[in-house]
């Protein structure tokens, strides 16, 4: 048999290297064995059924990045992994969770994957005690996650309130008291705003809208809308329509309709994510002709507050208070 | 070789003369004017004609004035320019490749623009048409240069044959689209923004002054294309005949691709990636005035403008109170038209 040529030798070496790398990688993956629910456990009902959770929670990974992260941070659970926000999202203002997330990062939490691109191997590597996330993120990969760790599913906006989810995670992690405390703090803040700004609330029509160059819309199921409804704000027409169908599509308007859609609003909570769009709105004469804009009754947030838990809800109350302070 | 060359050059189909073509062109120009007015009058916000007339007299209210000057006039002008550019680019590409089903996507120009827009969104934070403008144009130019170079290398001579151009365009398109795909896969937010661009959209507040460089490219491209008409006629009879008629094929291809780059780059910078205009408009015009490029090029420009304006108007009202992007409307019309063309061409060849 003729001896292999250098080319053939290289090919064989390359294949061998790939094989060795694959074995090494699979070894790494299998090293991160499921932590399993060994020892003392708690049983909790979740939106995806019963979950048996270890009593000792050493590490938590979240998959969605808003409500799940909010709840985990608010309950002061040991977050070790979370989805990163794409830089090209162009977030221009500080998100409600930024400060606490930075603290978690300082304690060792890591960005494991990008939002909507869950990486099972990265989760396996971390071997978390539990994974907490919306059912929407869990369902497509539930079997894989179940093989790795305990999954505590919370609902999406249409399924459960953030308070219900907070209590579910609290029960699962032995932090029910903290969860109840957070809910009570929120209720107290709502009451405080209702009392302090009773006159403004009764006389100011408000609309929480997302603005872009292509369209504007109001979502009845968004967290901002839910919080505003909790306070009992007087809704502008578009907001009232959105609230009447919270589980359906957002109420959308073309750019031509900006003025007619929101001209009855006395104050606007505007969700604009990028600096470029925020600057572009000032060149839109239909926007600048809105009574609320002329009166300077506009407070900005961004899409990071469309969903969340107690921290984001309190952030929205801050924004609402800022809005009423200007009225 | 193809049906493009089946009718004597420069002539209309049998029985159709200069007057006949002139009438069609006059009718098309009138229709363009009517559709332009339609673009100003019809929209997702119902405005009474009296209010629009008041604006014309300088006594309009804020809302009507803003809708007219910031939205309807710019988007209608963009639709006319973009449609004209893509239609003429289609004529040029079909002429150079002698492929009746060719459109600006075939030579990789659209894929080049798309990739650069993706890069602009993903790595440079662009999120508005003004931000994409130069990236779209640069992408079209780079892709055209690469395709021409590869076509020449593959052809092994000074000029590229239609077949090598198409093959090079297809290969370059595939590579560029793959790179775009990878970036989009890694960045969901880029995908969100790119989605609007790639379907083609004219909505929103548009500053025409920002788009002036793109308009300039389109105008230059149209002038070059009109001047290129006789060369296209010669090329439609085959490379050898064109050469025997004194055409330098290398120069001809260079001029043609330059015009295509100017037209497609300018068009995609204005209104995103609109499909099917470069296919529908030239074929509709050929049915009316024949394959002679002296008529085909300017006539296609008019019909391309009409198509995009009408598609945009449909998109404004069909999903009231929101809008359907013009590219989606064009695709819904263009796909059946494309299939009809395939069947018609096969029958003609049989």
Image: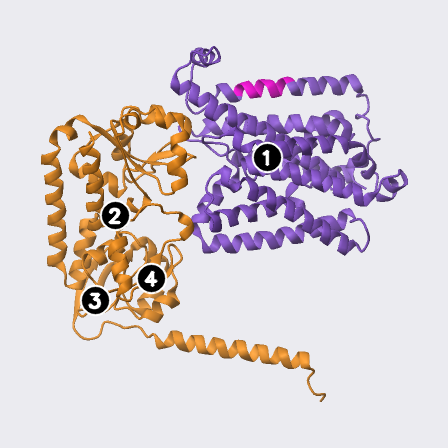
Cα distance between the residues tagged 4 and 1: 50 Å
Question: Nearer the N terminus, badge 2 or badge 4?
Answer: 4
Which chain is purple in the rendering? B
Q: Residues within 10 Å of mark 3 (few under 14, many from 20)?
A: many
Residues tagged by mark 4 and mark 1 found on one chain of the structure: no
Q: Nearer the viewer, mark 2 or mark 1?
A: 1
Q: Residues within 10 Å of mark 2 (few under 14, many from 20)?
A: some
Find residue A53 and name its label: 3
**Residue numbers of the magenta segment:** B30-38
At x 40%, y 52%, the residue is A87
Cα distance between the residues tagged 2 and 3: 22 Å
The residue pinned by badge 1 equals B214
The residue pinned by badge 2 equals A159
Cα distance between the residues tagged 3 and 1: 61 Å
Of B1 and B102, which appears nearest the observer? Answer: B102
Which chain is orange in the rendering? A
At x 45%, y 47%, the residue is B125
Residue reaching furthest right? B244
Of A77 and B120, which appears nearest the observer? Answer: B120
Label 4 SS: helix
């Amino acid at each position: 048999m003729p001896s292999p040529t250098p080319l053939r030798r290289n090919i064989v070496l390359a294949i061998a290297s790939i094989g060795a790398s694959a074995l090494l990688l699979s070894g790494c993956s299998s090293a991160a064995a499921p932590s399993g629910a060994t020892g003392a456990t708690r049983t909790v009902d979740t939106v995806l059924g019963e979950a048996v959770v270890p009593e000792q929670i050493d590490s938590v990974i979240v998959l969605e990045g808003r409500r799940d992260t909010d709840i985990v941070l608010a309950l002061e659970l040991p977050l070790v992994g979370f989805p990163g926000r794409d830089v090209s999202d162009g977030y221009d203002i500080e998100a409600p969770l930024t400060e606490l997330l930075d603290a978690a990062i300082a304690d060792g939490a890591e960005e494991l994957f990008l939002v909507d691109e869950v990486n099972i191997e990265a989760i396996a590597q971390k071997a978390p005690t539990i994974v907490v996330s919306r059912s929407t993120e869990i369902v497509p990969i539930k079997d894989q996650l179940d093989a790795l760790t305990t999954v505590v599913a919370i609902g999406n906006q249409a399924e459960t309130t953030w308070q219900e989810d907070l209590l579910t995670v609290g029960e699962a992690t032995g932090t029910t008291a903290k969860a109840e405390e957070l809910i009570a703090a929120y209720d107290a803040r709502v009451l405080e705003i209702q009392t302090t700004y009773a006159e403004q609330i009764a006389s100011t029509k408000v609309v929480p809208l997302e603005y872009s160059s292509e369209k504007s819309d109001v979502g009845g199921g968004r967290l901002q809308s839910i919080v505003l409804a909790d306070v009992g704000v007087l809704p502008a027409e578009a907001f009232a329509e959105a609230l009447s169908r919270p589980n359906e599509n957002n109420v959308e308007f073309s750019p031509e309709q900006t003025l007619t859609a929101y001209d009855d609003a006395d104050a606007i909570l505007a969700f604009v994510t990028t600096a470029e769009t925020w600057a572009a709105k000032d060149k839109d004469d239909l926007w600048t002709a809105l009574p609320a804009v002329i009166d300077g009754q506009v407070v900005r947030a961004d899409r990071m507050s469309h969903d969340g838990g107690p921290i984001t809800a309190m952030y929205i109350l801050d924004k609402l208070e800022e809005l009423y302070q200007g009225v | 070789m193809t049906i493009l060359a089946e009718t004597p050059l420069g002539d209309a189909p049998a029985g159709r003369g200069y007057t006949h073509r002139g009438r069609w062109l006059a009718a098309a120009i009138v229709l363009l004017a009517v559709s332009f007015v339609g673009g100003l009058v019809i929209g997702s916000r119902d405005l009474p004609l009296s209010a629009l007339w008041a604006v014309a007299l300088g006594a309009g209210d804020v809302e009507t004035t803003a809708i007219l000057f910031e939205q309807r006039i710019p988007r209608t002008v963009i639709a006319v320019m973009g449609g004209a550019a893509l239609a003429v680019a289609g004529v040029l590409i079909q002429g150079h490749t002698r492929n009746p089903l060719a459109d600006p996507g075939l030579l990789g120009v659209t894929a080049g623009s798309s990739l650069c827009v993706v890069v602009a969104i993903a790595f440079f934070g662009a999120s508005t048409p003004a931000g994409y403008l130069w990236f779209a144009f640069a992408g079209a130019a780079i892709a055209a240069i690469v395709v021409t170079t590869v076509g020449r290398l593959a052809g092994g001579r000074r000029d590229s044959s239609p077949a090598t151009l198409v093959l090079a365009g297809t290969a370059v398109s595939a590579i560029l689209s793959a790179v775009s795909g990878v970036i989009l896969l890694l960045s969901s937010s880029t995908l969100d923004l790119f989605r609007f661009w790639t379907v083609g959209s004219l909505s929103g507040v548009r500053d025409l002054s920002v788009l002036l460089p793109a308009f300039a490219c389109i105008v230059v491209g149209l002038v070059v294309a009109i001047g290129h008409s006789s060369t296209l006629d010669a090329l439609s009879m085959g490379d050898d005949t064109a050469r025997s008629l004194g055409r330098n094929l290398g120069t001809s291809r260079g001029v043609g691709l330059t015009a295509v780059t100017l037209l497609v780059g300018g068009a995609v910078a204005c209104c995103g990636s609109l499909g099917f205009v470069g296919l529908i408009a030239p074929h509709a015009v050929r049915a009316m005035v024949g394959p002679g490029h002296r008529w085909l090029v300017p006539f296609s420009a008019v019909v391309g403008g009409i198509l995009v304006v009408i598609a945009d108007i449909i998109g404004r009202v069909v999903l009231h109170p929101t809008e359907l992007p013009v590219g989606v409307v064009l695709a819904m019309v263009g796909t059946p038209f494309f299939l009809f063309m395939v069947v018609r061409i096969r029958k003609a060849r049989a």
